[in-house]
Image (tube, rainbow, N blue to C red):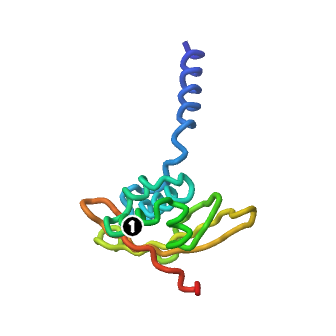
Amino acid sequence: MKYLCFIFALTTLFLAGCGNEEAGRGDKDTPGYAATMYFDALYNRKDMKAALKLSTPRLARIMRSYGTPSQFTRNLVNMQFDQVTIELDMTNKSLREQYGKKAKVNLIFTGQLHGDQVDDMRSVQMVKRKGDWYVDKINPDPYAR
């Protein structure tokens, strides 16, 4: 009987490790989580529909005009990656942003483009509507020409 319980526990442990790798980490009710999932949909999954669900109608209209995630990110966001890791910049995190209707989120992008290491940072404006956070505006890179 103990042997059977051990096998069952071991099997459960292995199955728990086979979870969805696309799921992001962190609290799903925060602006940082929504911003991270938005850019993950654009850069890693290349899924325009998933990114549109995480954007405001105004930004969604602009995104649709570009047609594909790669065109949108190349022209409007001005960043390109073959594969990227997206992290929140926690240096200026404020608790107020989680309870208000608007938030500014800074994201750090570390990835590869044609075999070269690319590091970049972007700031996005988030709005909360009906309890969910949406990307409203991607702030331009202040150091770009």
What residue is at 36 percent from the left and 66 percent from the top? 61
Can residue 131 be seen from the camera position used here? yes
In the displayed orientation, state which residue is furthest to the left: 130
In the displayed orientation, state which residue is furthest to the right: 115
Can residue 90 be seen from the camera position used here? no
Q: Which quadrant is the C terminus positioned in? A: bottom right
**Quarter assignment of residue 28:** bottom left
- Residue linked to disc 1: 135
Q: Answer left or right for 85 relative to 76.
A: right
Q: Answer left or right for 96 relative to 123.
A: left
**Quarter assignment of residue 143:** bottom right
Locate residue 51, reporting x and y percent: 43, 58
Label 1: few (<14), some (14–19) or many (≥20) C-alpha neighbours in 10 Å? many
**Quarter assignment of residue 14:** top right
What residue is at 31 percent from the left and 65 percent from the top? 57
Q: Which quadrant is the N terminus positioned in? A: top right
Locate residue 113, reporting x and y percent: 69, 64
Position of residue 94 relative to residue 32, above or below, is below
What residue is at 39 percent from the left and 69 percent from the top? 62
Looking at numbered disc 1 in the image, what kind of residue is underneath it?
Answer: Val
Total count of labels: 1
